[in-house]
Image (cartoon, rainbow, N blue to C red):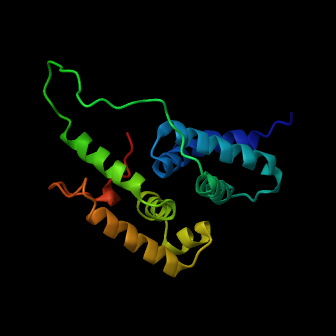
């Protein structure tokens, strides 16, 4: 097998940011890791032909892979209705709000979710987002508008909590 030190350096340096994007697209860390690994494996084969700045190519590969996944994967976990009681103070309000926003984001159609992630989480311009998705700037604007409108009226978010997706970029 051929060694490619530039590829290893790129993966070391950029994987955290790319994994964050993959997580935001899929809504699941394991699926995000699978998405990133699949995209990197595809890019590794073409690494010698990539320019000095391969990140846009890798990001495009992630988006293409994400948008082409047709089947829904079951993760084998079943949520419970009640959490076990613990003897410490409840500080889950912020976590509950964050989870509600993530859930609302996952309910968006894939293209709208991709636009929201790229525009508001990755802070890309409308032009960069349009180029990555292979659509016009007008399509990015309309998809972003529809996505934000859907998030504003989402029933899970409408119970008094405010949801500002532009501040949810800190994944922890």
Q: Position of residue 91 (x, y in %)?
A: 17, 34
The residue sitting at 34% across, 60% down in the picture is 166
| 153 with respect to 60 (left or right) | left
Which of the 4 image quadrants contains residue 56?
bottom right
Q: Could you tell whether 147 is left or right of 33 in the image?
A: left
Q: Is residue 165 left or right of residue 36?
A: left
Figure quadrant of residue 60: bottom right
Residue nearest the viewer, comparing 56 with 53: 56
- In the picture as drawn, the residue positioned furthest to the top comes out as 87
Instruction: Give coordinates of residue 9: x percent, y percent.
Output: 67, 41
| View extreme (bottom): residue | 138
Picture coordinates of residue 172, whole percent (x, y): 37, 39
**Quadrant occupied by the N terminus:** top right
Q: Is residue 64 above or below residue 26?
A: below
User: What residue sits 49% from the left and 61% below the top?
Assistant: 118
Residue pictured at 51% horizontal, 64% vertical: 111
Q: Give above or below for 38 relative to 110.
A: above
On the rendered structure, is 100 left or right of 30? Answer: left
Residue 151, horizontal then vertical, whole percent: 31, 62
Number of numbered callouts drawn: 0
């Amino acid at each position: 097998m051929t060694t490619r030190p530039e590829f290893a350096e790129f993966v070391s340096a950029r994987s955290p940011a790319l994994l964050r994007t993959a997580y935001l697209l899929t809504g699941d860390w394991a699926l995000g890791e699978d998405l990133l690994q699949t995209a990197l494996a595809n890019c590794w084969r073409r690494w010698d032909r990539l320019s000095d700045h391969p990140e846009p190519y890798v990001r495009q590969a992630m988006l293409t892979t994400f948008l082409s996944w047709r089947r829904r994967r079951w993760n084998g976990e079943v949520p419970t209705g009640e959490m076990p009681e613990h003897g410490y103070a409840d500080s889950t309000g912020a976590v509950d709000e964050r989870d509600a926003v993530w859930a609302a984001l996952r309910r968006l159609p894939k293209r709208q979710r991709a636009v929201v992630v790229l525009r508001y989480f990755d802070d890309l311009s409308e032009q960069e987002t349009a180029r990555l998705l292979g659509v016009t700037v007008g399509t990015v604007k309309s998809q972003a508008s529809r996505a934000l409108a859907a998030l504003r009226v989402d029933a899970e978010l409408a119970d008094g909590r405010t949801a500002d997706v532009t501040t949810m970029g800190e994944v922890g």
